[in-house]
Image (cartoon, grey):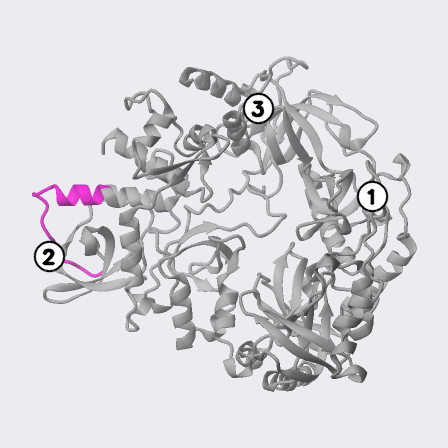
Amino acid sequence: MLEGDLVSKMLRAVLQSHKNGVALPRLQGEYRSLTGDWIPFKQLGFPTLEAYLRSVPAVVRIETSRSGEITCYAMACTETARIAQLVARQRSSKRKTGRQVNCQMRVKKTMPFFLEGKPKATLRQPGFASNFSVGKKPNPAPLRDKGNSVGVKPDAEMSPYMLHTTLGNEAFKDIPVQRHVTMSTNNRYVGKDYSAAQELMEDEMKEYYSKNPKITPVQAVNVGQLLAVNAEEDAWLRAQVISTEENKIKVCYVDYGFSENVEKSKAYKLNPKFCSLSFQATKCKLAGLEVLSDDPDLVKVVESLTCGKIFAVEILDKADIPLVVLYDTSGEDDININATCLKAICDKSLEVHLQVDAMYTNVKVTNICSDGTLYCQVPCKGLNKLSDLLRKIEDYFHCKHMTSECFVSLPFCGKICLFHCKGKWLRVEITNVHSSRALDVQFLDSGTVTSVKVSELREIPPRFLQEMIAIPPQAIKCCLADLPQSIGMWTPDAVLWLRDSVLNCSDCSIKVTKVDETRGIAHVYLFTPKNFPDPHRSINRQITNADLWKHQKDVFLSAISSGADSPNSKNGNMPMSGNTGENFRKNLTDVIKKSMVDHTSAFSTEELPPPVHLSKPGEHMDVYVPVACHPGYFVIQPWQEIHKLEVLMEEMILYYSVSEERHIAVEKDQVYAAKVENKWHRVLLKGILTNGLVSVYELDYGKHELVNIRKVQPLVDMFRKLPFQAVTAQLAGVKCNQWSEEASMVFRNHVEKKPLVALVQTVIENANPWDRKVVVYLVDTSLPDTDTWIHDFMSEYLIELSKVN
């Protein structure tokens, strides 16, 4: 292949891995991080990089913003699209691969405490040259002394390129196939995006077989033999023989996972040079759907949602046939495909379909969120069947001894299981896995969301599982109709009034005025029993007329801001769990009453935790880098303390999920707890904005975030013991006044979210622990034979960059 064609292929691979495009100044850095080389636009005859990019419109789409910023996007590859269409057409119910999901995988990280390259024990503790002195470049040679090295090699993160390969057919069990193949750096198909590597290989196969007249079709084939097959649209694919006939063979395409009968005249011997790339089709099992694997409706739903599409994948169990959760990440929100499939096969006859202008009585309001959204249960066939089924499960657990099989051992997002509260077993869906101990669940039939311990969940008994999954969620999302627009955001007083008025009232009534199918919400008039059906006495009119809408400007309230953040209130919004969960929450409630006050006072430095331990100048320490802006500013965490931090984060999630809503005044430069996305962090409040947001600094992770001021709570004493883990750092041994975006990106790619060894040069102390700073050398010891000194690498990079520019 010509150099220009190879550059185009690799450039497409870079751009395809960035669905939002790559800014032109960053493109060289991204390309080098993938290929190890710069884009050689001058060697290709172009004066500038932009000129080269505009010469390959089939590869790059260039957009220029109003401010003049240029962003590059990948153009769709027609050959890749044809292959996807070919895969999608393989719908025969007779083929054995009908229930396997074939996709080009990218690993989705869902665990916030998941550390790339997490060591099995610790990083090496190397010895150093005795002539080392502060301010002087250390001798890199003795960093790893093979005789004195302590510890083990860190486990690399499971790369999307290291997928286990199986064909999922008993006929192949004795045939040597490529399994657990890893890519070496000298492989011509190496790359971030394996779909691009596969595309490159197939292009070369097409050129090799179509232009070489001496190559002839195979005459005799054996089961298990690897072949190159001339498939539809003149595509050349790798295949393995399943069965043979006189003039036809059946081929399983090892990179796509489906089979078809082809003429022998289209099959050729596979050249060994096309065997270096591991087989791309991996047979998977979709977690949570195992019990329904023989359901033909489920097979159709899975095929319609997955075939020919690209997903992110969460690998739950790295078995020969991995157990996975698929996510569609093409939109703003990730869509859990497993959960979507479950919802699609629910028994439609058990769903509640609200009709406009219809009246419904004996309605129970089960949850009220702090934005005024409410969830209701309407009497129906599905609710009656659910109640009967839960009673049977209650009797089953009462009669049967609770064994280890009843506990949830493998939690994942979208999994449906049971949670015991108020003396009843209720259905919950796992919505977010924080760690191995803590997770968020949503009560399917009340709409409530809370954080719980994994040990509090139970598996649905197998005999009830299929019947339980078939019942649709019975919580109907509603909002009060025709409220004045001037009301705007709901105040805590308005939310509390609504909860006091109707929450858990089982004989309310609603009149439906509108059903918004796209948002899944019904607009209703809500009535309490004594006011039905007078529209002038509806809850809608009462809450509009009540004096509940005074938004305070000077004192910000710490009411939690959404249904997902508001699992518990003093009105019993969150059902209290029994057994160990009930005792746990009771203890937390007692602590809350003792430790939280309506107004926070300025915390003195004596109430802060001690500063985190740092090694002395000239000594080394194992660190993790959660944030890296550029060599002049990044953040380190002591590696040995990370487990303690994980435990603290779990306890904060569980603690604040059941804490009462508190009205607090907040002050700048004080320490609080704040909810950032789905996790609670210890933060320093940096500023108060006029739009209801506050600027906070995460004291354990070193990130600056904007959060709603309602998500700020006092940091209670129990979370003030562990030292704040984030320490600001600067790279020693390299000098640069201003780091370019390209250089910053290269640095981030080599250190961010990685465990490293830090050799301390200077420690700059400060009265405030968050203002301490260290100057360190960073060393990557993950390779078996070579230590990478980051400052040496960055120095060489700056020299190379100056040559290119």
**Image x and y of residue 328, in percent:** 47, 56
- Residue lying at 82% horizontally and 47% vertically, measured from the top left: 553
Residue at disc 3, secondary structure: helix
Q: Could you tell me the amino acid type at mark 1?
A: Lys
Which label sits on residue 174? none
- Residue lying at 76% horizontally and 52% vertically, measured from the top left: 652
Judged left or right of residue 296, residue 772 is right
Q: Quadrant of residue 4?
A: top left
**Image x and y of residue 346, in percent:** 51, 77
Which label sits on residue 143? 3
Q: Could you tell me the amino acid type at mark 2?
A: Ser
Nearer the observer: mark 3 or 2; the answer is 2
Q: Could you tell me the amino acid type at mark 3?
A: Leu
Which label sits on residue 265? 2
Judged left or right of residue 168, residue 701 is right
Give the answer, above or below, for where 691 lies relative to 498.
above
Q: Earlier in the sequence, mark 3 or mark 1?
A: 3
Image quadrant containing the N terminus: top left
Q: Which residues are magenta?
A: 204-223
Q: Quadrant of residue 192?
A: top left
